[in-house]
Amino acid sequence: MKKFALTVLGMVPLVAHAQSSVTLYGILDEGLQYQSNVEGGKRVSMDSLSGPFGSRWGITGAEDLGGGVQAIFTAESGINMPNGQAAQGGTLFGRQVFVGIKSAKYGSVTLGRQYDMVFYFPEFISGYALMGGPTSVHPGDLDNAANSIRWNNTVRYMSPSFHGLTFGGLYSLGGVAGNFTSQSGYSLGAGYTSGGLKVAAAYEFFKNPTSTAGKGLFTDNQSGASTLSGSLNSGYQVAQSYQVAMFAATYAITDKWTIAGSYSNTEYGNLGGNFLNSEAKFHNFDIAVSYKFNPFLSTGLDYNYLKADAVGKVGNSDVGNQHYNQIAWATNYTLSKRTDLYGSIGYQIASGTNSLGQSAVANICNLGDSSTNKQVLVRLAIRHRF
């Protein structure tokens, strides 16, 4: 009898968690990259972080709580395959990690380190996303359309679909003692799908984006690695605010042809007295077209133009009056449901004066400034999903 009772008790957790699921998943995206000019010289390297999705592994799960409600979680870490280290500046779960509640009727609320609304809405239907990969990333990724940065200390809401309409919002708590709003921000977005047409928009604002390692928005990785590394925007590290407004649309013309494009406005606000308390504003446009030869082979072209407004500076001529033209081509061949090969090439030319008051130089995907105003990036890669 005692043995039978122990057996029954041992089965209780299995019964209680029968409606739970936990999934291990990942992407391994390793490529050989060539850059024509980085700080005056050519570079050939291995890279697993700049691909269309970026190498990662993660665990996601859900528990049925009844009534169409679930407890959900995801913990996802980037993988720097050439050296085996964690990506996102060494942050263990640098891509995202959150837990929350999801309702089929009312949507989801999650808490943790999460993506912004640019990621969930306009990014996926932009010209960049249609192409994918580093060769079509918007210069500097100023609008975060390639999700270079995530948001710490966040509460996020995502709606269900209302006849093709979805929306969401995110708020990041600053956590600064005595200053509730410092290093805090919010992000809002919405999208609509009807047949082959998809449109989406997002807006976000963050206060005091630059801080010590692991804090702020631009420095939210463990190492403090920042998107303010290139001369395009490194002169604006004193910015007291950061905001982005982005709109994107895509349309499947036929089963084979798809076109996509986006516009974003990015602003680094209140640059301080040295910049006459002004703002640095950037306008980015992209357009791309893709063609699918068959279920296994596809190709596409992308064009991107970035215009940066001039910023006044004490004792100097205006800085930051920059123009970037970038064109990229990519092709993908699917070997199986999980494995594919792809290649891309990008060419960028810069003109004007950068944020440091020097001649603007090329820098594709924030992988390093060229010593001239031109740069070529080539990537050949294999990608496997599990």
Image (cartoon, rainbow, N blue to C red):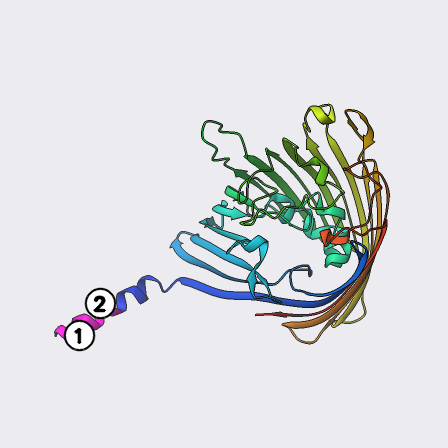
Q: Is residue 8 above or below residue 233?
A: below
Mark 1 residue element: helix
Question: Any magenta on residue 9?
Answer: yes
Q: Position of residue 89 (x, y in %)?
A: 58, 53
Instruction: Indicate whether residue 154 is drawn in magenta.
Output: no
Mark 2 secondary-structure assignment? helix
Quadrant where the C terminus is found in the figure: bottom right
Left or right of 221? Residue 69 is left
Q: Which residue carries the number 2 mark?
A: 9
Segment colored magenta? 2-10
Residue type of the residue flagged with mark 2: Leu
Q: At 22% from the left edge and 70% from the top edge, which residue is drawn?
A: 8
Work out whether residue 256 can be spotted: no
Q: Quadrant of the N terminus?
A: bottom left
Residue 55 percent coordinates (x, y):
61, 63
Could you tell me which residue is drawn at 72 percent across and 29 percent down?
279
At x 57%, y 35%, the residue is 185
Q: Is residue 313 above or below residue 204?
A: above
Q: Main structural element of the magenta stretch: helix, strand or loop? A: helix
Near mark 2 (Cα within 10 A), the count class, few <14, some 14-19 or many ≥20, is few
Query: Circle 1 is placed at which residue position?
Result: 4
Where is residue 297 drawn, in percent x and y?
Answer: 77, 71
Picture quadrant where residue 330 is located = bottom right
